[in-house]
């Protein structure tokens, strides 16, 4: 019996050792692949979110200068979008690599995986039916990030979402599932991405400040136009606004409306995103002072 027992157990022990070695090797290879994929994704994200000047900045000859206002905003949006997509890709890579390793280990241990895959498939279908809205939110959030529809700091109008009134506010956080907004009253809104059917972005690329100036119907039209042109030129020459806030020379569009009591002129200025209100207020102050000096009354 003493000579038979070792011969009987030897193949079992050898099989266990071989199986253990295989499990360890598969686990190590899976972890190495996961780490390599994460590093590769991290490098791609870092390259995509690097603070490089925009095309407009390079055409203006700003390669060696710090990012200006528009370039800084574009760089920040690019960084947020790249980091979010990088996080999603890392999770997907981990699920694929570790899931494949787990199935390989089970097969190496002679565990039948066909019934397991069938059960997982049925469970996945059941979960899919129960989480359709969640999947819809994630897919909508992914396309929103890829298309750069809006980012943190943007002022957006998401319209009338499903089951809620129209919401306008500043974006405070963006995830694949929800967008967090803060409106003018300080109220925080959590909007599911899947419920957003349209988005109006007031902060993307550039904004426009428009100021309507109503003067008396009997006012001297050429004189008022020249006066408003002087105000626009003074604002454009102001170093505190030119280039850093206002990106193009303000324009006097002329007469916008005519009534029996007033003639309405419109002044317009293109600004960097989200600064149109500031420029509009400054224009109103300067227009009011200029009209007072010229003794031109503002119509009711």
Image (cartoon, rainbow, N blue to C red):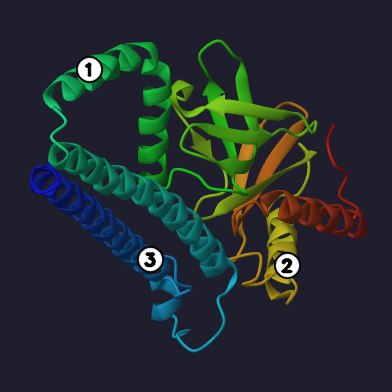
Query: What residue is shown with label 2?
Result: 235
SS at mark 2?
Answer: helix
Residue depth check, mark 3 versus mark 1: number of the one nearer the observer? 1
Say which of 79 and 21 sits in front. Answer: 21
Mark 1 packing: few (<14 Cα in 10 Å), some, or many (20+)?
few
Label 2 close to label 3 by CB (< 8 Å): no
Q: Position of residue 152 (x, y in %)?
A: 59, 48
Query: What residue is shown with label 3?
Result: 48
Task: Measure the C-alpha gap from mark 3 to mark 1.
Answer: 40 Å
Mark 2 / mark 3, whichever is N-terminal: 3
- Toward which corner of the image does residue 28 lie, by quadrant? bottom left
Mark 2 packing: few (<14 Cα in 10 Å), some, or many (20+)?
many
Q: Position of residue 78 (x, y in %)?
A: 45, 59
- At x 76%, y 36%, the residue is 217
Quadrant in which the C terminus appears:
top right
Say which of 273 and 248 sits in front. Answer: 273
Task: Measure the C-alpha gap from mark 1 to mark 2.
Answer: 70 Å
Quadrant in which the N terminus appears:
top left
Determine if residue 248 is in view.
Answer: no
Residue depth check, mark 2 versus mark 3: number of the one nearer the observer? 3
Query: What residue is shown with label 1?
Result: 119
Mark 1 / mark 2, whichever is N-terminal: 1
């Amino acid at each position: 019996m003493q000579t038979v027992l070792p011969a009987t157990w030897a193949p079992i022990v050898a099989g266990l050792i071989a199986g253990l070695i295989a499990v360890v090797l598969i686990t190590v290879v899976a972890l190495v692949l996961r780490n390599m994929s994460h590093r590769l994704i991290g490098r791609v994200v870092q390259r995509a979110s690097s603070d490089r000047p925009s095309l407009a900045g390079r055409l203006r000859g700003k390669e060696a200068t710090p990012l200006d206002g528009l370039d800084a905003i574009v760089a920040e949006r690019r960084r947020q979008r790249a980091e979010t997509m990088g996080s999603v890709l890392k999770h997907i890579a981990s699920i694929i690599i570790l899931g494949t390793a787990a199935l390989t280990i089970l097969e190496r241990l002679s565990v039948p995986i066909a019934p397991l895959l069938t059960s997982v498939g049925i469970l996945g279908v059941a979960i899919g039916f129960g989480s359709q809205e969640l999947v819809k939110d994630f897919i909508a959030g992914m396309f929103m990030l890829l298309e750069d529809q809006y980012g943190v700091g943007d002022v957006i109008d998401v319209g009338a979402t499903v089951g809620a009134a129209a919401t306008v506010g500043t974006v405070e956080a963006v995830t694949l599932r929800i967008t967090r907004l803060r409106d003018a009253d300080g109220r925080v809104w959590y909007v599911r991405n899947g419920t957003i059917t349209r988005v109006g972005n007031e902060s993307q690329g550039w904004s426009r400040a428009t100021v309507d100036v109503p003067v008396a119907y009997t006012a001297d039209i050429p004189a008022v136009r020249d006066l408003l042109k002087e105000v626009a030129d003074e604002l454009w020459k102001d170093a505190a606004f030119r280039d850093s806030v206002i990106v193009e020379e303000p324009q006097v569009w002329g007469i916008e409306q005519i009534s029996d009591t007033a003639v309405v002129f419109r002044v317009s200025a293109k600004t960097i995103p989200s600064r149109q209100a500031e420029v509009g207020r400054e224009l109103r102050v300067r227009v009011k002072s200029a009209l007072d000096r010229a003794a031109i009354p503002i119509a009711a």
